[in-house]
Amino acid sequence: TSDIAAWVDEFGADGVRIDAIPMMPRSANRRIAAALRARFDHSSFKTWLIGENFTGPGAFELLKAHLGPYGLNTEFHFPLMWALRQTIASGQGSMGDIATTFETGERTWAGSGAVMGVMIGNHDVPRFASVSVGDAGGDAWTSAPLASDSSVFAKQSLALGIAAALPGALFLYYGDEVALTGRGDPDTRRVL
């Protein structure tokens, strides 16, 4: 925890993103949170801790376990990401599925004080535009062709608009703003 605090101090960070939350004991995340808050929090500043707890659809309780006053302030809202991708990019389901997913998360995390991280994708999944095109599979070492169909851009705009309009902290993975394609890691991390 002293190394993390030193980096926050060195760069004047407002918060920390903790990667791979499920790969470490919950007590480790709580120790990091306690150490950073004890050192940096005061009446006009609160350290912000976001965790990447990669889950599938519907894993609300798994995310809840790491939130709260002694844990993380936020986590990436993966269940919502999956609902946006399923409904909008893949064209399966309904807008009601997105609303239900969001409402279920809100009920599950009520009282935690969390402000969830809302996004349409990240580096661990095929890019939203590739899902929309129907080219999310295939060799991730070969760059997926760039999107050119106007329906892909319309889907991307709709998903980003919903993500931006919902309560939470919007996270924009680089390239999502221009519908960058990518089949999977490492193609999801290509240079913009």
Image (cartoon, rainbow, N blue to C red):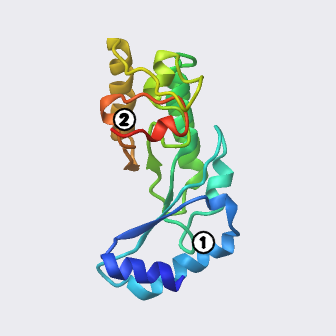
Residue at position x 52%, y 25% from top? Answer: 96
Dot 2 amino acid type: Asp
The residue closer to the viewer here, 106 or 83, is 83
- Residue occupied by mark 2: 176
Quarter of the image where the C terminus is located: top left
Horizontal arrangement in the rendering, residue 174 relative to residue 71 (left or right): left
Quarter of the image where the N terminus is located: bottom right
Structural distance between the alpha carbons of marks 2 and 1: 29 Å
Q: Quadrant of residue 39?
A: bottom left
Mark 1 lies on a secondary structure that is helix
The residue closer to the viewer here, 104 or 82, is 82
Q: Horizontal and vertical percent for residue 73?
A: 48, 65
- Residue occupied by mark 1: 29
Instruction: Determine which of the numbered discs, if any, sits on residue 77 in the image.
Output: none
Q: Is residue 55 above or below residue 114?
A: above
Horizontal arrangement in the rendering, residue 164 relative to residue 135 (left or right): left
Residue at position x 40%, y 69% from top? Answer: 15
